[in-house]
Structure formats: C-alpha cells, structure tokens
Image (spheres, helix red, strand yellow):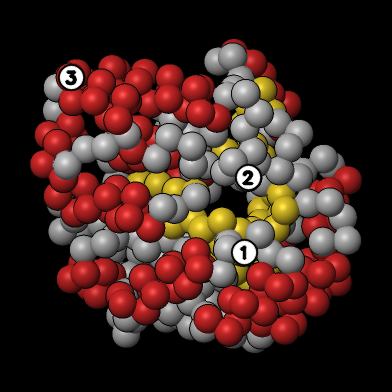
Amino acid sequence: MQNLIDKAKKEHSLTKSEIVKILKDNSVNDYLFKSADEVRKKFKGDEVYLRALIEFSNICRCNCCYCGIRRDNKNIEHYRLEKDEIIKLANFAIQSGYKTIVLQSGEDLFFKANYLAEIIKEIKKSDVAITLSIGERTFEEYKILKEAGADRFLLRIETTDENLYKKMHPNMDFANRKRCLFDLKKLGFETGTGSLIGLPGQTLESLAEDILFYKELDADMIGIGPLIVHPETPLKDEKNGDLILAIKVLALTRLLLPDINIPATTAMETLHPQGRIMALQAGANVIMPNITFEKCKKNYEIYPNKASVNYSKLQTDLENIGRKISNRKGYRKDFLK
C-alpha cells in the first residue's frame, strides 16, 4: 500500500481501484497524510492563504437534502445584504489585510449578473482577488461576472455519482452542474469544486470517481468536507460523515493534483477541535475565515454549530506546525520557489 502512495506522490496518478484500496486501508493513514503534506510543501510551500468569506444571502431556490438553507426550511430567518453592506464588509477585509474576498450565497436569483458585476467592480478597485460561490448560472452570466473582474468560482459537485446526486438534489440537473464547471474553466476562472463525505448511499468507489473527476476537470481548488446533519433537513436522522475518511480524500486529492489550492474546511473543525490542523497537515493550504455580520452568520446555517476562526489562535497553531499566514492572493500558480 505504501508503494501505491509512493507512486501517487511521484507520478500524481492512480487508477480508480488503487484509490479505493487506499481509502479502504486505515493502516496507512499516517503515511498517506505525511506524503500529502510533503507534496503540499514541495508544490505550495508553507504559506497558508486566508480568504475572507462574506455570506451575502441565505435565500436559495434549491432544495438540497443536506443543506440547512434549503428552500423548504421555513424555520430560518432569511436575509439579503445590500450592495453597500457587501462592499463595506469587503473593505473591512481589505483593511484587515485579506488578499482574497469570497462572495457566497444561496442560489438567490435576486442577484442578477449585472448587479453582482457592479459589486465586483467596486471591490476590484482595491488590489484583491474575488472568488464567487453563487451556484448555477448561464455561460453568458458567468461571462459578465468574469469580465467584471471575478477571478475564481467555487461550485461544489458534492458527488459525481449521478444517481446519488439526483437523490440529494431534487429537481436539479447533474449534467447542468457539470456544464457549469466546464464553462467556468473555459471562461478562465480559477475553478473550484469538491465533495461532501458521508452522504447516505455514498461508496468508496464513488469517492474515487470524485477524485478522478477533479483531475479530468483540472480543478484549481477543491473543498472537501464531512457531512454534518442539519435537524431541518431530510437527512436529520443520518450520521455525520467520517472526519478521517474526509481527510483521506483530501490527501489523495493533493497527491493527484499537487499544485491546487485545498481549504481546511470549517466542517472539519466543527467535528473535531483539531480538524483544521489535521487537514493542514494532510495537504490543505487555505483557510476561509467568515467575516459576515454576526446577525447574519447564525442564519447562514448550512449545518449547525459551525466553528469559527480566532485569528491570534490560528497564528499560534500555524507556527506550531511550521506554517505561516501568506500575504499573497494565492492563485494556483502563485507559489514562488
């Protein structure tokens, strides 16, 4: 099994069956994590990129079975930030030293592409990168957003198992999800996607397919997080996802796509007080502190009890593992050897 991991470390390639073998075998976890960390160090260095996350609307047209801001959850206080509020938060982040602003929302079609373009242009007056995470749009809408100055786009596929995707995403179109991702790449966005680990019915084979899909897409960012069940969703009686399995998927993703950006997701820290550090020591190199207004944070509840980021504690934690906060925007090809 170590030979397989060595192969992945050297060639950045594995077959589906080889990925499944590694996912099945927990005896090699430490070796896998150490190998992924070495690849991260070689290709990305020791800097950790911080992205300031602004959750500007929790209104969503979708009804995903695992998500607390799903359309049918009536026990939620909905909000939309005004244009000026979004820009105010972005300016606060910029003054605080952040080099990337992440604008994230539910699939809220109130925010037309042209309206978002105005916000993007205003924020881009400062020297920062902008990541969008707003869901499925047309090629033409993505083009407007790119031309306004957006640099990156995050659209998690959650699972590449089409049958499972359909079960988890009522009335959504798997082919359209994939179309969006390839459109984003075509338009020149740094394109991010990722998976939810622990969906009911998910297999190790489908997780292997997820990793191979990231490679096929040549994704620039991958977000991987364990399922955390929300009490107001159809999955309320399911178990949370397995943190170690999620970190294994992350580590294998680092081995196969050595120079991409991979966040240590909040969900990992929510499940385990050291979850974020565990992820950083298994291939992750990005953290996304949430700077949304406090009154809104509690209502952007994709899952409950979300962990937060304490900046001074984070600095100390990073120093303890030989890492440091970057002062760069952190594009995929941004590593200066």
- Identify the mark nearer the N-term, 2 or 1: 1
Placement of 26 over or under 98, stated as above or below:
above
Direction from residue 328 to residue 127 in the image, left or right: right
Q: Secondary structure at mark 2?
A: loop
Q: Is residue 49 left or right of residue 293?
A: left
Q: Which mark identifies residue 132?
A: 1
* Residue 80 horizontal/vertical position (percent): 69, 76
- Residue at image position (53%, 81%) is 139
Q: Residue 108's x, y, as percent?
A: 58, 80
Q: Is residue 74 at all visible to an observer of this figure?
A: no
Q: Amino acid at mark 1?
A: Leu
Residue 33 higher or lower than 141, as above or below: above
Give the mark toward the camera: 2 or 1.
2
Q: Position of residue 142 (x, y in %)?
A: 59, 76
Q: Is residue 225 depicted above or below 296 in this figure?
A: above
Amino acid at dot 3:
Asn
Find numbered disc 1 in the image and state the secondary structure of the residue it sits on.
strand
Q: Label 3: which residue? A: 3
Secondary structure beneath dot 3 equals: helix
Residue 59, image x, y percentages: 57, 77
- The one of 68 and 23 positioned closer to us in this rendering: 23
Identify the image quadrant of residue 134: bottom right
**Which of the numbered marks, if any, corresponds to residue 176?**
none
- Left or right position of 27 against 175: left
In the picture, the quarter occupied by the N terminus is top left
* Residue type beneath disc 2: Tyr
Mark toward the viewer: 1 or 3: 3
Q: Which circle marks residue 331 in the picture?
A: 2
Please tell me which of labels 3 and 2 falls first in the chain. Answer: 3
